[in-house]
C-alpha cells in the first residue's frame, strides 16, 4: 500500500509564509481589539511582520510542508 502524503495544516498555512531564504514570516499578536489603551508607537510596531524564532521553526515548518 502506498504511503499517503501529509497534508499541510490549513490554519497554519493561512498564518505563516516561508520566505525565499527558508525563514518563516508571521504577523504579530495583540492588534485585534482594545486598541485605545495602546500607544500609537506600539500599534505601529504591531503592523509589521516578523520572523519566527528558532525554537518554533522546526515545528511550524513540519506542519506547513505539503
Image (cartoon, rainbow, N blue to C red):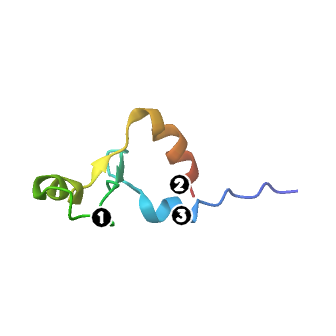
- Helix, strand or loop at mark 1: loop
> Residue 65 in the image: x percent, y percent?
55, 53
Q: Categorize mark 3 by other alpha carbons within 10 Å: few (<14), some (14-19), many (20+).
A: few
Q: Determine the residue located farthest toward the top in the rendered image.
A: 55
Question: What's the distance in space between the residues labelled 2 and 1, CA to CA?
Answer: 31 Å
User: Mark 3 sits on what residue?
Assistant: 11
- Helix, strand or loop at mark 3: helix
Q: Categorize mark 1 by other alpha carbons within 10 Å: few (<14), some (14-19), many (20+).
A: few
Marker disc for residue 34: 1
Question: What's the distance in space between the residues labelled 1 and 3, CA to CA?
Answer: 24 Å
Whether residue 40 is situated above or below residue 57 in the rendered picture: below
- Helix, strand or loop at mark 2: helix
**Taking 48 as reference, is 40 left or right?**
left
Q: Nearer the viewer, residue 8 or 21?
A: 8
Q: Nearer the viewer, residue 58 or 4?
A: 58
* Sooner in the amino-acid sequence: mark 2 or mark 3: 3
User: Mark 2 sits on what residue?
Assistant: 64
* Sooner in the amino-acid sequence: mark 2 or mark 1: 1
Amino acid at each position: 500500500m502506498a504511503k499517503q502524503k501529509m497534508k499541510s495544516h490549513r490554519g497554519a498555512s493561512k498564518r505563516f509564509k516561508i520566505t525565499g531564504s527558508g525563514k518563516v514570516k508571521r504577523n504579530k499578536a495583540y492588534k485585534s481589539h482594545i486598541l485605545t489603551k495602546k500607544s500609537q508607537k506600539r500599534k505601529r510596531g504591531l503592523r509589521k511582520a516578523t520572523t519566527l524564532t528558532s525554537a518554533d521553526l522546526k515545528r511550524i515548518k513540519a506542519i506547513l510542508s505539503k
